[in-house]
Amino acid sequence: MSLPALLTQHIARRPQRIALLQHIAEQGSITRAAKAAGISYKAAWDAIDELNNLASQPLVERSTGGRGGGGARLSAEGGRVLRLYQRLQNLQAQLLEAAEESTDLDLLGRLMLRTSARNQLQGEVSGLRREGRHDRVSLALGGGLEIDALITHDSTARLELTLGIHVVALLKAGWVQLLASDDEVEAGSNCLTATIEQVLADTQGPSEVRLSLANGQTLCAFAEADWLAQQQLLAGEPVRVQFHPSSVLLGVPA
């Protein structure tokens, strides 16, 4: 099975993240791998979450008893990605030789933009229907999970969206709201049940909450520390999250 185009493009322009996978394979530890890559533990997990979400299967798996703490190992798919990257490096060398002008590579770089959205969920268009000035696009994320996005008719046409096409849903962490056990979901909002993976406290603002979905993909949200304590929401606890379809941005391979 070939890798999704979005993941292939991502690893082609973010080689440092592939280097991180190599360090994980060698060290068997997130802590040691992050140190070897010259990045923070948090930045390492941010990179892993993004790669796992873009891949059809997780590239990195948690393991117990890892050397140096934060045990992790590459999955079979993760090992395959490393081998694929070696092939991409060869293709990159050919591209450099084929570029007619130095400005060609600058142009390609502008065409493949990065995004500030913390959450990037891979899905497949499972429904398309018109609602006034917008189109409601239903996305199957896998594992029985589904969300909706509201975009303009022009956006649907520009992205050439059709049933079955693979897309990435972009969602800023600030748009994801954690719900208390007795909170009702706002009418029309997406609602997913997740498990709290980690809470990263911040003395100068809301805590960052990493969430694991049942299909293996992850979400990031923010919540006040006092509210989390009041709700007794700690790592390992289930929680519901909601976000409005209009907050979901869609992207497809260029």
Image (cartoon, rainbow, N blue to C red):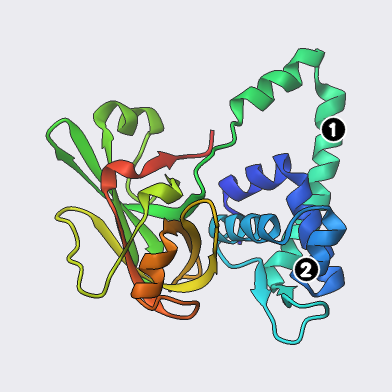
Distance between the alpha carbons at the discs numbered 1 and 2: 35 Å
Residue 3 figure quarter: bottom right
Give the percent coordinates (x, y) of residue 35. Answer: 83, 60
Q: Earlier in the sequence, mark 1 or mark 2?
A: 2
Disc 1 to disc 2: CB gap under 8 Å: no
Provide the residue designation for mark 2: 31
Give the percent coordinates (x, y) of residue 91. Answer: 80, 39
Circle 2 SS class = helix
Give the percent coordinates (x, y) of residue 6. Answer: 57, 46
Residue positioned 76% across, 78% down in the render: 69
In this rendering, is residue 104 above or below 14?
above
Provide the residue designation for mark 1: 94
Near-viewer residue (123 or 186): 186
Give the percent coordinates (x, y) of residue 114. Answer: 59, 36
Residue 99 visible in the current orientation: yes
Q: Quadrant of the N terminus?
A: bottom right
- Which label sits in the foreground, 1 or 2? 2
Amino acid carrying label 2: it is Thr
Q: Is the residue marked by circle 1 packed among few (<14), some (14-19), or many (20+) residues within 10 Å?
A: few
Q: Is the residue marked by circle 2 packed among few (<14), some (14-19), or many (20+) residues within 10 Å?
A: many
- Report whether 251 appears left or right of 102: left
In this rendering, is residue 42 above or below 64?
above
